[in-house]
Image: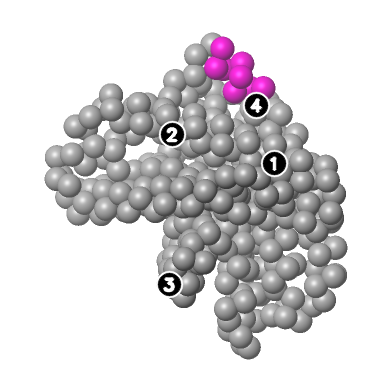
Amino acid sequence: MSSARVRSVPPNWFAAVMGTSIVATAAHALPVRLPGLDAVAWLAWAAAGAILVTVVAATAVHLVTDRGALRGYLLDPQVAPFYGAAAMGLLAFGTATLLVAEPLLGRAAVATAGALWVIGTALGLATAVGVPVLAFTRHTVAPDAASGAWLMPVVPPMVSAAGGALLLPYLHGGAAQALAYACVLMAGAAGLATLALLPQIWSRLAHHGRGAAVAVPTLWMVLGPLGQGTTAAGLLADLAGPGLGADRGVLTVVAVAVGMPLMGFALLWLAIAGAVTATTAREGLPFSLAFWAFTFPVGTLATGASSLATHTDAAALSALAVALFALLLAGWGVAATGTVRDLRARRGRGLSVPNRPAMAGS
């Protein structure tokens, strides 16, 4: 891959890895086994791996050939939050590998998931601290700038909490205990950071409106921490009991008590975001990489609903999980089709970001 073909590869591209990986994970997690579901999981996992390799390689070439790119991205208040996507892309593919590919790859799947968890968690913690610090000290932020994209750098620890819970069965003793407590701490950090940001996003929408059409899909990003929080709570209830020294039954009650309100608000926000998006689409919704917000956030709702269905045996929650998975597949189809068409239209220009003025929505 020549440098001439890689003119700009910002971290936004990792959203495609996130969105494709969650299809595999959500297919595996569904409480209802449907025909072809395993094939969907395998195809999504393979596609996510191919996208991850491509984006990592293109990013490496770009950063090597343009030594000022990283600094420029970090100092851009519209781009810097999307380094959270890089962290979550690694974490999401690691989780998909552990859940989907372990029957084929065995210990290699566990080792791959563990390595990606360590790297993704380190990067995610760096973004959760570093991007807010940059926003508070270096970025110039307009009063109407708050958007779902602001959640991107602070949500990775929640994704680490869910992925870390899945690794607990492979650890023992002090290592398992340390990881269990780390997962709880990271889930709490991301959850409270989300609570701090959501009122700002709501206030911006109430006082300044939806903003540029190209940025409207970022509204869907709000669903991510809600669904991932529900998922993480369920996984920790199932797997963290020995490490935390807590009864699984008690943890399950806590997971359902936490997950149900989160799911309730998520469905409320899904209706709001869907209505605003539909209205904007009728007026003209240009493609951008923000379309991948129709995937990972919805996928976390599907995994969260699957977890709640498993813990409550509620048929209605199983039906909700299936419906959300169908919505995820539809969102993935829209995002993937738009991305392929845009790349064909921009052939020879590398992985540059369309609609640069609305980078927060790209």
Disc 4 residue type (three-letter): Gly
Q: Is residue 280 magenta?
A: yes
Are discs 3 and 1 less than 8 Å apart at CB? no
54, 32: nearer the viewer: 32
Q: Mark 4 or mark 1: which comes first in sequence?
A: 4
In the picture shown, does residue 360 fall above or below 224?
Answer: above
Residue indicated by mark 1: 322
Magenta stretch, residue numbers:
274-282
Q: Is residue 319 magenta?
A: no
Are discs 4 and 1 less than 8 Å apart at CB? no
Residue at image x 84%, y 55%? Answer: 312
Q: Mark 3 or mark 1: which comes first in sequence?
A: 3
Residue indicated by mark 4: 274
Q: CA distance from mark 2 to mark 3?
A: 29 Å
Q: Residue furthest bottom?
A: 173
Graded by Cα atoms within 10 Å as few (under 14), some (14 to 19) or many (20 or more), the crowding at tag 2 reads: some
Which quadrant, please, contains the C terminus?
Answer: top left
Residue indicated by mark 3: 108
Q: Mark 2 or mark 3: which comes first in sequence?
A: 3
Give the main secondary structure, helix, strand or loop, of the magenta stretch: helix
Residue indicated by mark 2: 336
228, 73: nearer the viewer: 228
Tag 1 secondary structure? helix
Residue at image x 26%, y 48%? Answer: 58
Graded by Cα atoms within 10 Å as few (under 14), some (14 to 19) or many (20 or more), the crowding at tag 1 reads: many
